[in-house]
Image: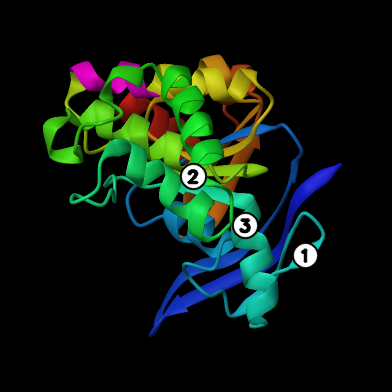
């Protein structure tokens, strides 16, 4: 059962066409990794899925709701889609606990006690329960990114989008964030991950896609994608990063 369907998605920034007709289906519980060079459209595409960017042609359907200019549809989709960015986007003046419980209390109308209980469960899940009362500035980059993952999960999303979640981290912090994402994948969460972490793609992804110049150049299982790439562009990309 497809939880995300994209058909002929096109996007322009002025005269520059960032997406040139992207079509794909993502099954519920699938982990999809999208890789590709800078400017290939991969981040733009996943930002279109929750309307952080507006596509101009084609259609995107998320869990049965088509993404249109209808604000109600956008709100419905955003309620089901969590997103983790390169920069952690935490509120610096709020504690970790307050960052995680803010949206469940104000948007989902959950009680403070229930929200805090869920927040502690999630902090345990991402391995940093002891950081609950600290402020973001007191944490390492890897810890802040794990708080960002917990914050997205606090809204009980059906789908998680990750936009290069480790690219702003020091190398020794990358593993702890990837470990939290691996645990999430094992739980059956539908995930789209834009990343250059090819080890993660090999270990966790159900499918890997290469984007280049606004097009999907190749898609396959991790084994076939890495060991037997069909497209010359894929072979070149892999030779440069592996």
In the picture provided, is 65 more to the left or to the right than 238?
Answer: right
In which quarter of the view is residue 137 placed? top left
Q: Secondary structure at mark 2?
A: helix
- Taking the spot 58% from the left edge, 72% from the top edge, the residue there is 10
Nearest to N terminus: mark 1 or mark 3: 1
Q: Secondary structure at mark 1?
A: strand
Q: CA distance from mark 2 to mark 1?
A: 30 Å
**Decide: marks 3, 2 in contact (CB < 8 A)?**
no
| Residue interval drawn in magenta | 172-177
Q: CA distance from mark 1 to mark 3?
A: 12 Å
**Can residue 163 be seen here?**
no
Q: Residue 7 location in percent, x, y?
A: 73, 64
Between residue 219 and residue 92, name the one nearer to us.
92
Q: CA distance from mark 3 to mark 2?
A: 19 Å
- Taking the spot 29% from the left edge, 44% from the top edge, the residue there is 88
Q: How is the image coloured?
A: rainbow
- Give the residue at mark 2: 112
Task: Give yes or no for residue 129 being in the magenta stretch.
Answer: no
Instruction: Please state, as top left, top right, bottom left or bottom right, where the C terminus lies in the image.
Output: top left
Vertical placement of 135 versus 24: above or below?
A: above
**Decide: marks 2, 1 in contact (CB < 8 A)?**
no
Q: Residue 165 location in percent, x, y?
A: 36, 38
Q: Residue 121 location in percent, x, y?
A: 50, 23
In the picture provided, is 5 more to the left or to the right than 18?
Answer: right
Dot 1 alpha-carbon crowd within 10 angstroms: few under 14, some 14 to 19, many 20 or more: some
Task: Give yes or no for residue 176 being in the magenta stretch.
Answer: yes
In which quarter of the view is residue 192 placed? top right
- Give the residue at mark 1: 65
- Taking the spot 46% from the left edge, 31% from the top edge, the residue there is 235
């Amino acid at each position: 059962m497809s939880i995300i369907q994209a058909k002929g998605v096109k996007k322009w920034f002025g005269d520059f066409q960032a997406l040139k007709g992207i079509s794909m289906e993502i099954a519920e519980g699938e982990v999809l990794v999208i890789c590709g060079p800078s400017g290939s459209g991969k981040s733009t595409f996943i930002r279109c899925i929750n309307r952080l960017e507006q596509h101009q042609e084609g259609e995107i359907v998320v869990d049965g709701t088509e993404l249109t200019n209808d604000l109600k549809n956008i709100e419905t989709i955003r309620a089901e889609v969590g997103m983790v960015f390169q920069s952690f986007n935490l509120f610096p003046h709020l504690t970790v606990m307050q960052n995680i419980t803010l949206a469940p209390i104000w948007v989902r109308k959950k009680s403070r006690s229930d929200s805090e209980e869920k927040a502690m469960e999630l902090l345990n899940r991402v391995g940093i329960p002891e950081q609950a009362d600290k402020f973001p500035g007191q944490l390492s980059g890897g810890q802040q990114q794990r708080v960002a993952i917990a914050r997205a999960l606090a809204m009980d999303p059906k789908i998680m989008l990750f936009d290069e979640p480790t690219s702003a981290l020091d190398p020794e912090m990358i593993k702890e964030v990837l470990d939290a994402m691996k645990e999430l994948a094992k739980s059956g969460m539908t995930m789209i991950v834009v990343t250059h972490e090819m080890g993660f793609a090999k270990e966790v992804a159900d499918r890997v896609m290469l984007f280049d110049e606004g097009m999907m150049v190749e898609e396959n299982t991790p084994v076939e994608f890495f060991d037997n790439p069909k497209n010359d562009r894929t072979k070149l990309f892999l030779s440069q990063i592996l």
